[in-house]
Image (spheres, rainbow, N blue to C red):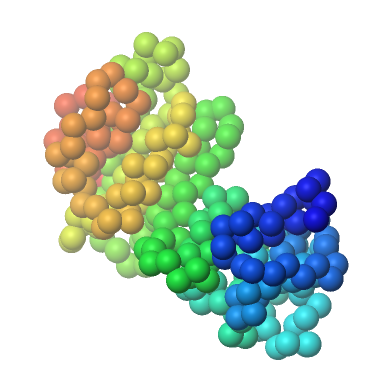
Amino acid sequence: MNQDDPKKCTALKLVRLGLVKKISLRQVSKNALLLNPMSTEIICKTDAKHLNSGLVVIDCSWKEEIGIKFNSNGFIQVDDKMQTNVSNVFAIGDVVGPPWLAHKAYMQGRKLAYHIAKIPANIQIKNIPYAVYTEPEIASVGLTEESALEQKYDIRVGKFQFAANARALTSDDGKGFAKVVVDNSTHKVLGVHIVGKNASELISEGVLGLNIGMKIEDIESSIHPHPTLTEALFEAALVSLDKSVHSFIKKSKSE
C-alpha cells in the first residue's frame, strides 16, 4: 500500500486497529473512503466533485445504483448512527449537510467507528460549537435570542463585558462580551455566545453545559479562578439572575 496516500494510510490504520480485516482498493480519489462493515472491507471509490472531507463518505453517483436517499438540498440522509437508508452504507461530514465543520465531522467519525466496532459510547452531536477566528474571536453554541424566541421560549439573557474583566484588562484587550440565553421557566441554559479574546477556547464550558442540561445556577455556583477570562461567563450568569456586582448592566434582559 502506498504510504504517501492519506486515504490509503487511513484505511491501513483501521486495519491495524482491528476495525476491518481486508482492504479492497478499486479506485482511490483524494477525499473518499467507503467502509462496508458487513463484509469487513474498505472499498475506496469516489466521485470527488461531490466531496470535501470525512472518514466515511460515499460516491454520490451510486444514488441510482444502490438507492441511497438524498434530501431536497442534495445531502445524504442518515440516522443518529450515521447510517443511510441502505443497511451497510454510512456517511459523515460535509456530505450529510451543514454545519460544514471539521470538529463535527470528526465526532461523527468517532461515533460511527464505535458503532461499527460495537463499542458502547454516548457521543452527542447536537450541540455543535461555532468559532470564527477574527479579531476579536467569535464563538457560539446553542440557541441565539432570536432562535429561542422563534421556538416560543420565555427567555432571560445575561451579558457581561470583557471591559469589566480583570484578566482582559491586564492583557490590555477588553473588547467583547460573554452572553447566556436562559429558559425563564426551567432556568436551563439554551445558548452561550462569546465575542472576545480566546472566545474559541472559552466556549467549551458552554458545550459541556448544554450536553448535560445545565441550569444557570450551575454556573453561578461554580468557582472560576481569578483573574481569568472564564469569569466573564460566570458574571453573565449572575447578570441573568439579577445578582451581578461587576457588570455595567445590572439587570438581566427578560423577554
As drawn, which residue projects farthest toward the right? 27
Q: Quadrant of the C terminus?
A: bottom left
Please indicate whether residue 41 sits to the left or right of residue 79 in the image.
Answer: right
Which corner quadrant holds the N terminus? Answer: bottom right
Q: Residue at x 64, y 54 (%)?
A: 13
Q: Position of residue 53 (x, y in %)?
A: 69, 56
Instruction: Locate residue 236: give its quadrant.
Output: top left
Identified at 21% across, 52% down, the residue is 215
Nearest the viewer among 219 and 179 is: 219
Can you say whether 87 is above or below 214 in the image? Answer: below
**Residue at left 45%, top 46%?**
140
Question: Which residue occupies the foreground of this view, 18 or 139?
Answer: 18
Can residue 73 be seen here? The reply is no
Q: Residue 7, located in which quarter of the rendered image?
A: bottom right
Looking at the image, which is closer to me, 82 or 27? Answer: 27
Residue at x 73%, y 67% (from the top left corner): 23
Residue 118 visible in the picture: yes
- Can you give x and y, in whole percent of width and height, for residue 117 in the image? 50, 68
Q: How many marks?
A: 0
Front residue of 152/28: it is 28
Instruction: Judge from the rendering whether residue 246 lies leftward or rightward of residue 31; answer left or right.
Output: left
In the rendered view, tell whether residue 162 sits above or below residue 190.
Answer: above
Residue 67: give x, y in percent of width and height.
Answer: 70, 88
Q: Is residue 248 above or below residue 123?
A: above
